[in-house]
Structure formats: structure tokens, C-alpha cells
Image (cartoon, rainbow, N blue to C red):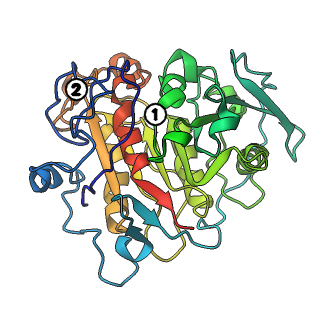
Amino acid sequence: MRFFATAPLAFAASWVLAISVVGSCTTPSSDVDGGDLLGVFDRDASADARDARTRRPADAATDARGSGDGSASDAAGVDDAGVRVRVAPGSTCIAPEGLPNREIHRTVGRPACRDAQILEWRDAEGSPRYACVFAPKGVETRAPLPLVVFFHEGLDDPTSVDKKTGLRKLGAHLNMTGDPAHAGFIVLAVQGRAILGGKQGTIFDTDYTGADSVDLAAVDHFYDELATKGLVDARRVYTLGASWGGRMAATYAMARADRVAAFATYGSDAPRAVWSCAGPPPPAVVLYRACDTPFPCESVERWLRARDGLAAETEWVRLGAGNEDEPNCSVRNRCSALKGTAHHRRWPKEREADIFKFFAQHTLGP
């Protein structure tokens, strides 16, 4: 995998955030002011060394620079700002698998998202569906803006955008377009259903990838509702999910590869969806913990190796108990089930910059 050059992003000067190199084992000073770029988002003199540090755990020989055989360079180019521009396939890129899960444990009500627009719809199976829209102030005057579709983990709902993440604050001012007139982004947080007998809380049915999936349809509906209002920059749509929501972020990105420029997951391994189009799957940045009970480190890295085999552009961040990089998965002797569950539930808020740095470097072609 190559670590591609990153164009400068505009941050509000008051935002202080620790920026770290994806996949590396060292972390720069947490005193860096996010408003002072200091070249953080540009290629530096040590880019070649950084490329080596950011290889996936498989340490694969596959290099996604491509050779005319459907590899990454055949599906993407680089614009004048150094941003990767991917040419999207014209159809869905996952094969139908599984059966729809209709084992509804309970009806999930309207989420209590504060200071957010709450969208409502009823899916083909009659279930009420909800999504929260977290948009920066004055979104109408800034639109169209990038869109981040957020999928919560099983024991949460869309309110976790405020409770766990810094996405609302970032969305107020983070500039992923390079155009000051279009600074900020919108978060569309879709709510899952209480399926699987409620064993995993409120989740998305990623084990079923048929064209009539009600979860895919719900996301499509809420996306279209925003897009028809002219709010969404269609070249910059991304998915992001935690735990079981990470599987949905990956699934939707592959099912709607003509819509999603890149995706990110935290604490999640491979979805059931199997890529079926020519060329590599959408680019991804994967954050995970060395000590994780629901989604063990080794399971995540099997997925990373599988993406290697598809020449899929993938960056990864393997974390310890906090926000520090962990050199390998070999912490199992110190990773109890209780500790691994607690680590899994700890959203890496201080590493969100890694995710958005990656997103800002990927768009869809016109």
C-alpha cells in the first residue's frame, strides 16, 4: 500500500487536536494547534519511510500502484491538489448473500438527537426508520457539503455522535473541499433495528446483501432526502461505523460504490458482503485495538490481508488501550474478556483526524 500525498485542510484556529501518522508507532506532540497546519497534511521529507511504516499487517508484496490489470491506479487518478479521484463502477458491486433477518425483538423509537434534524421513514417491512442530521450552522449558504454517513454500534443509537465522537464539532468547520465557501460537512446518523432477538442491541442486517435489503434502502432514502435539497457534495460521500456499525459502513460503501468515495471503520472486521466488480473495492481506513473481545485483533487483520489480495487501498491504525499505537496483536495474555470489551467500547475520539485526513484525500470522479 502506498501512503498518498495529502492536500492541506483548513481548520479553525481554536481547535487543538493531536495528529498522528496512520499505522505508525510514534505519535507527534498533542500540543499541535489544528489551526496551524505546519505541513501536517502535506507530504514531508520522510514520506518514503512513512510508506514502509504504513504497510498493512500482512506486509504484503502487493503494491496498489497497479499495472493495468484492474488494480488501484486503473480505478483512480490524482488531481492537481494531490487528491485521489476514483472512477466509480456503474452498478452495485456485491453479490446477493444470506436471508433477510426479520426477527425483530422490539420497535426502536425516535432517537433523542439534540439540535439536529430527525428524519423519519417507514421501510418495506413496515418498520419505522430514523436518522439524525447534524449539520453546521448556515448549511444552506455553504452547500453542497461533504457527507459522512455514520453507523452506530449495537448498544448505541445516533445520539452517540454527540455522546462519544467529535464529529459535530469537526463538521462545523473542517474543510475537506479546499474551498473556504464550502467548509464543514454534514453527518447523517442512521438508526439500526433491534434484530437478532435483541442480542446485539440495535444493529444493521449486514448478513443479508440482497437488493431488497431494508437497511440499504433506509440509507438510500435518507441520503436522497438530503441530496434532493442540494446539500450534498456528491463527489465527497463517506461512510463511518463503529463495531457492528463498521460492518454496515463497509457494506454500504461496496453496495453503493458509485456513491461512496471511501469508508472508515473502528473495532470491526470483515462484513459478509463480497466485492464482485472489476478493480479494487473502495478505499478504507481501519482503526482497531490490539485488545478487543467482540472483534479480536487477529480477525481484523485477516480482513486487512483479504483487502491486500484485492489491491484495495487500505490504511490502518492498531491501537492500545488508549490512543497510542500498538506494535502488534500479541497482548492476548493481558487481554481479559472484560478488558477487551471495555477497550472495544472506547471510541478513539483523539484519532478522528486520521480518519478525516484519509477522507479528504479521496473523491469520486465526475
Q: At label 2, which amino acid type do we have?
A: Glu
Hey, which quadrant is residue 273 in on the image?
bottom right
Residue 141 position in % (x across, y down): 67, 36
Q: Earlier in the sequence, mark 2 or mark 1?
A: 1
Dot in front, 2 or 1: 1
Residue 156 position in % (x across, y down): 60, 22
Hey, which quadrant is residue 341 in on the image?
top left
Indicate the secondary structure of the residue bearing disc 1.
loop
The residue lying toward the viewer, choosing from 105 and 305, is 305
Q: CA distance from mark 2 to mark 1?
A: 24 Å
Q: Is residue 84 left or right of residue 105?
A: left
Q: Which residue is mark 1?
A: 174
Q: Quadrant of the N terminus?
A: bottom left
* Residue 251 sits above or below residue 266 on the image: below
Q: Residues within 10 Å of mark 1 (few under 14, many from 20)?
A: many
Q: Is residue 115 visible?
A: yes
Q: At label 1, which amino acid type do we have?
A: Leu
Q: Is residue 128 visible?
A: no
Residue 172 position in % (x across, y down): 54, 27
Q: Is residue 208 left or right of residue 168?
A: right
Which residue is at a point 39% across and 17% down the rendered structure image?
342
Q: Quadrant of the C terminus?
A: bottom right
- Please identify the residue farthest to the right as the structure is shown: 126
Residue 91 position in % (x across, y down): 65, 71
Q: Which residue is mark 2?
A: 324
- Marking on residue 206: none
The residue lying toward the viewer, choosing from 81 and 48, is 81
